[in-house]
Image (cartoon, rainbow, N blue to C red):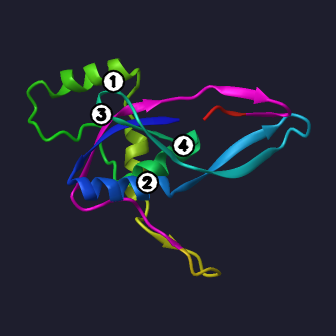
Amino acid sequence: MHLYLYARGKFEQVELWKTHVQAAYWKWRRKNNKTGKEEISIVQGGLRPSVLGAYEYIFPKEALTEVCSFMGIEKNEQYGFGTIGLYARHFCLRTIFGVRKIPKEILKKAKELPDTFSTLEFERAVSNCKIPGVVIHVIGIKDDTDITIGDYTHEAL
């Protein structure tokens, strides 16, 4: 899945956000066509620059709720420019990028997830990438297609 967004803030804070967002790993599922079983690997979330100064974050589709929680995305419209033309602006951006809104039920579930977690058996803890002074402006999401390579069928990240 692809999440298109703008990140705005002080240069050094945005650079810190970019570092944090790229350090996250997500479960990636693929089906072994020989055995019929699902296998899980971990993949690093990919952040790359896109057109018009936006960023594109690539991750497995099953992680959408956690990615929204991880980035602090609580609603589809996060522009602070008032309501005049707001919906038209978002519609135009979604059309240009070929994306759709994040479903409201995903955003509701993301809001309920904890910001951090740790395990009892390890010293490692996991946190979010909410950086003070950085604002995320969501454009929308785009699904990947499933492909078959060799003995596996999986999401074409």
Amino acid at dot 2: Val
What range of the chain is rendered magenta? 125-153
Mark 1 in CB contact with mark 3 (< 8 angstroms): no
Disc 1 residue type? Arg
Camera-nearest label, 1 or 3:
3
Pointer 1: residues within 10 angstroms few (<14), some, or many (20+)? some
Which residue lies at the image location 41% right of the left edge and 20% below the top edge?
Answer: 98
Residue 24: x and y in percent read 51, 57
Q: The C terminus is located in which quarter?
A: top right
In the image, residue 118 above or below residue 68: below
Of callouts 1 and 2, which one flags the residue occurring earlier in the amino acid sequence?
A: 2
- Residue 59 horizontal/vertical position (percent): 54, 43
Q: Name the residue under label 3.
A: 53
Q: Earlier in the sequence, mark 1 or mark 4?
A: 4
In the image, which disc is placed on residue 94? 1
Asked if residue 22 is positioned above or below residue 56 in the image, the reply reads below
Q: Is residue 30 above or below residue 14?
A: above
The amino acid type found where label 4 is placed reads Phe
Quick one: label 4, few (<14), some, or many (20+) residues within 10 Å? many
Compared with 42, 38 (above or below) is above
Q: Residue at x 42, y 59 (%)?
A: 20
Q: Tell me the element at label 1.
A: helix
Q: How far apart are marks 2 and 3 (CA)?
A: 17 Å
Sequence-first disc among 1 and 3: 3
Residue 73 in the image: state x and y as whole percent: 34, 48
Determine the CA span between mark 4 and mark 2: 11 Å
Q: Looking at the image, do the residues carrying marks 2 and 3 touch, with CB atoms under 8 Å apart? A: no
